[in-house]
Amino acid sequence: MPWFQRQLRLRPRSRGFHLITEEVAAALPEISETSVGLLHVFLQHTSASLIINENADPTVLSDLEASFNAIAPENFPYEHTVEGPDDMPAHVKAAMLGTSVSLPVGNGKLLLGTWQGIYLCEHRNRAGGRTLILTLQAN
């Protein structure tokens, strides 16, 4: 079974949840030639995260953002404050959501559910670009 690995640099995005499914798929054209496989997507940052979630109703994303802001507010008395008030809440959110997702690949496509997509969860107010490592095990 061959393995493929690519680095994908995402452009800077505003705080919130951003659909990146097409960018991920486009970065690995080998997906289209894969009959059975597994794609692992890893984010090389500690103040953002990755999730698979609904891609049909945008209110899901705004509700997620509001919920996580309530769970990890900027006005909490954090000790780690050197990088600004949005930094430590970003680390808390990333710790809860995680920095990787794995997806099945079959018949030349990502086998996501009907209403599912891959999201970059940007937890900083003014973050730079983010780097993903995409690893495909293909057959």
Image (cartoon, rainbow, N blue to C red):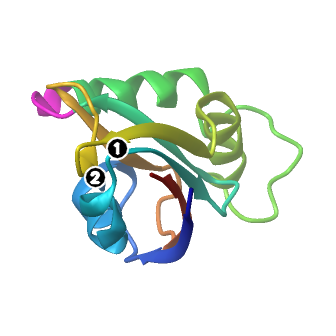
Residue 45, x across and y down, in percent = 66, 61
Question: Outermost residue, left direction?
Answer: 56
**Three-letter code, disc 2:** Thr
| Image coords of residue 98 (percent x, y) | 63, 37
- In the picture, the disc for residue 37 is none
Instruction: State how far apart marks 1 and 2 are (Cα).
Output: 5 Å
Residue beneath label 1, please?
Answer: 118
Where is mark 2, residue-wise?
21
Note whether residue 100 is visible. yes
Mark 1 crowdedness (10 Å alpha carbons): few <14, some 14-19, many ≥20: many
Q: What's the residue at 80%, 55% (across, down)?
A: 81
Instruction: Kindly indicate whether the residue at mark 2 contacts the one at mark 1 (C-beta within 8 angstroms).
Output: yes
In the image shown, does 103 or 97 lie closer to the viewer? 103
Residue 44 falls left or right of residue 109: right
Q: Judge from the rendering whether residue 83 lies leftward or rightward of residue 126; answer left or right.
A: right
Main secondary structure along the magenta-highlighted residues: loop
Residue 103 image-quadrant placement: top left
Q: In the image, which residues are magenta?
A: 55-59
Whether residue 135 sits left or right of residue 64 in the image: it is right
